[in-house]
Amino acid sequence: MTIPTRAQVELAAIRHNVGVVRGAAGGAEAMAMVKADGYGHGAVRVARAALEGGASWLGVAFLAEALTLRAAGIDAPIMVAVCPSGDDYGTGVVQGVDFGVGATWLLREIVAAAEATGRTARIQLAADTGMTRGGATVEQWPDLVEAALKAEAAGAVEIVGLWSHFACADEPDHPSVRRQIRVFKEAVELAERAGVRPQVRHLSNSAAALHLPEARWDLVRPGIATYGLNPAPALPDGGLRPAMTVTSKVALVKRAAAGEGVSYGHLYTTSRETNVALIPAGYADGVPRNGTNVLELLAGGKRRTVAGRVCMDQFVIDLGDDSLAEGEEVVLFGPGDRGEPTAQEWAERTGTISYEIVTRLGGRVPRVYSE
Ligand SMILES: *Cc1c(COP(=O)(O)O)cnc(C)c1O
């Protein structure tokens, strides 16, 4: 038994999108970012599809996410971007996971883990080129490079890559973009002069992969574009296809009198006698609560707007004199083929980005896959 709401994920779209990104990025290698359970789509299935579609690397935020991929038998190279103190680095080393390293204290923890396991840890040095989030600052970079080279000479680590992350790549003309490219170039040159021989140097997220050819280096790291959502909605997306469609089934239809308040707080009032339908999906499933009275979905071939409060498990739509059958499928969002809204449209209606719409899909919503 499952709940009536489900997320259908088209794996062909994932494969297609990796191809679109690699094409736009001049054939650079792709590290498909599958953190946060593959942006809500299911990390293991997405990872496999992305590799079939031409990605040669996978990226996650946390070690636990990388270990889930390894446990599923995925042996492609995986980079962990966020490495907090005290994580189980020994297991990560044994599993051949790459760690993003932006601080000497972290390097020391990973060296200790490598020595304890008798293996060489794979690391990718992270530079903060202007986002002021992860990575070593320009001031810290020379010391980090030197410490990493020492650890490499001792056999504790292998410096596999050098990388950084953009703050504003979705606005390619933002002045910080030029600056970050320049600072990254200098960081790479400094490391290479010092003797680092990285296999991969990388800076580009989805938006940069699509719009900043000068930021490609050896590979690009598409996240949202892998799932077919536009990283820079003001710009063309090069033919991406949204991979996820969320559907539910009408739970109940009934006649309501004119002037009736609908759902919690009575934030919607029927303007006349009308048919209302109950959709059994709510904010626990990822329907944003601030979609109250503004979100649209496709029901009975027409766009309908949520009538009143989105509740935890359900919301209501006003059908006027149309009717719907109980059990009839409705489409919350998808690629837009049938006239349904897209995740991008849901994001715009609720003041967020498409990333959040797909990523916060509830844990109780089954993901079902088509090849
Ligand atoms: C999430 C992430 C990305 C992907 O960003 P998108 O905007 O989704 O393409 C790339 N690099 C790192 C380090 C990330 O954490």
Image (spheres, rainbow, N blue to C red):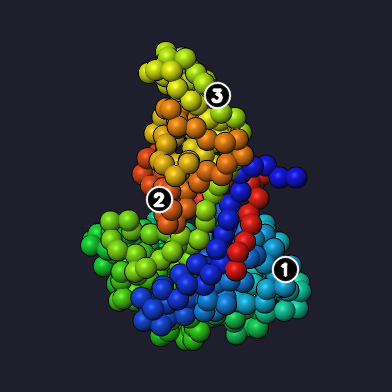
> In the rendered image, is residue 331 in sight?
yes
Label 2 sits on residue: 339
**Residue for point 57% across, 59% down:** 9
**Residue for point 36% across, 75% down:** 24
Query: Considering only vertical position in the picture, is 264 above or below 93?
Result: above
- Depth check: 158 or 309 in front? 309
Amino acid of disc 2: Gly
How many residues crowd around disc 3 within 10 Å: few (fewer than 14), some, or many (20 or more)? few
**Residue 317 percent location from the top left of the image:** 47, 31
Label 1 sits on residue: 72
**Residue 240 percent location from the top left of the image:** 40, 66
> In the rendered image, is residue 99 in sight?
no
Query: Considering only vertical position in the picture, is 340 above or below 26?
Result: above
In the shown orientation, is residue 18 left or right of residue 71? left
Q: Is mark 1 on a helix, strand or loop?
A: loop
Query: Considering only vertical position in the picture, is 334 above or below 172?
Result: above
Q: Give the mark nearest the N terminus, 3 or 1.
A: 1
| Quadrant of res 108 | bottom right
In the shown orientation, is residue 270 left or right of residue 367? left
Q: Mark 3 to mark 1: distance in Å?
A: 46 Å
**Residue for point 53% across, 76% down:** 53
- Depth check: 232 or 267 in front? 267
**Residue 268 percent location from the top left of the image:** 42, 21
Label 3 sits on residue: 254
- Depth check: 144 or 350 in front? 350
